[in-house]
Image (spheres, grey):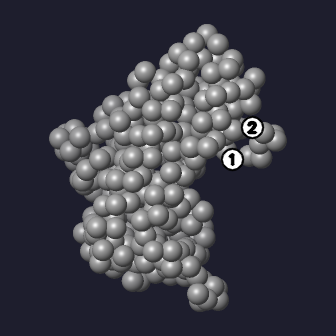
Amino acid sequence: MDPLVRKKMPPGWVDLAVGEAHVVRNALQQSFPTQLFALDDVTVGCDYQAPEGYRHLVEALERRHGGHVVITSGAKQGLLAVFYALKKLGCEHIAMRTPYWSQMPEAIRLGGLGLVLGNEPTYGCSYLIVSPNNPDGHITSPEEAQTLKAKCDQFKTFLIHDAAYHQPVYLGGPAPKLAGTTVYSVSKAYGLSGLRVGYIVTDDPRIRQLASDYVEASTVGVSLPAQLILHRLITHEEEYPSDFNVFTQLARSYLDDNKKLVATLNPEVIDASEMPEHGIFGWFKPGPKFAPEKAMVRIPPGSAFGDNSRIRINLALDPVYLKLAVQRLNAL
């Protein structure tokens, strides 16, 4: 079983494995009006929804990004829909760098594609940018993305960007476009993982249609109440950009506080000296005293991400639980 799959923890354990952006959600709820999260009439969303998404939300996102948009049930479904589209368009393989998100190889397989581990596309192989990368926070620059696009164009393949963490809150600045097809995560952008909403932005109308077909076949659209909340958030950002700036700064400050807390870990347990600048994960080296099960703390091994020498820690956890985990680990 994937060590990151959410599961019921024994009483008293602290879970640092699953990537919930708690501090981002806390910042959002403190910066935006609470009525944006309310559902006045849930019966509004009780019918099957259009596979491409709620029209007003799609239009708002297309204005923001300048491409075709398809709403999905989370970013993972968005990736699966894109992989399905690539397969239908004749793609057989897709490459990505190591380390990688533990669930990505299986998602690629489920999409009907073969996985190639590498830093650039090869003949007949599309390329997946994950930037900021999960788990190590690696950033792909616009210049690097342009070089990757030129190689994909040469091989007549596709450049895709998993942009789950490609947001101002994690970048500390603007989020430039890196690829012709991009998958976004509301779970990470706002810390609202329970909404189960993501979306695809693509310049290619074929990918837009095939991705819509995938959503229709797999979930018959996406929950309308969830889409309505996202539409309210997007609209509020457009009308009150200062609130978005407050949210971004507050979320980054909470993340910085958590990083300072994790930096106090005993290096004999976990060496947290290589603190990432981007994303929500610490990609650290375990020390000789590393024994998280004795501390009743769940930490996934680096082997799940393609690197046995590291472990991954969620830096965006509620600070109450993160502090408890640090105290327990330092007591080993």
Residue 211: image x %, image y %?
45, 66
Q: CA distance from mark 2 to mark 1?
A: 13 Å
Task: Return the disc, 2 or 1, that comes first in the chain's sequence.
Answer: 1
Q: In the picture shown, does residue 290 fall above or below 28?
A: above
Residue 6 image label = 1
Structural crowding at the residue carrying mark 2, measured as other residues with C-alpha within 10 Å and reported as few (<14), some (14–19) or many (≥20): some
Residue 257: image x %, image y %?
45, 40
Picture residue at 51% right of the left edge, 44% below the top? 316
Picture residue at 54% right of the left edge, 39% below the top? 314
| Image quarter of the N terminus | top right
Q: What residue occupies the far right of the structure in this picture?
A: 11
Q: What residue occupies the far top of the structure in this picture?
A: 288
Residue placed most toward the observer, 168 or 295: 295
Q: Give residue 42's quadrant in the image.
A: bottom right
| Image quarter of the C terminus | top right
Q: Amino acid at mark 1?
A: Arg
Residue 282: image x %, image y %?
48, 32
In the picture of the structure, the residue carrying the numbered disc 2 is: 13
Picture residue at 48% right of the left edge, 23% below the top? 272
Q: In the picture shown, does residue 263 fall above or below 56?
A: above
Instruction: Give the left or right position of residue 146, taking residue 126 as reference.
Output: left
Disc 2 on helix, strand or loop? loop
Please name which of the two marks, 2 or 1, marks the residue nearer to the observer.
2
Picture residue at 25% right of the left edge, 50% below the top? 173
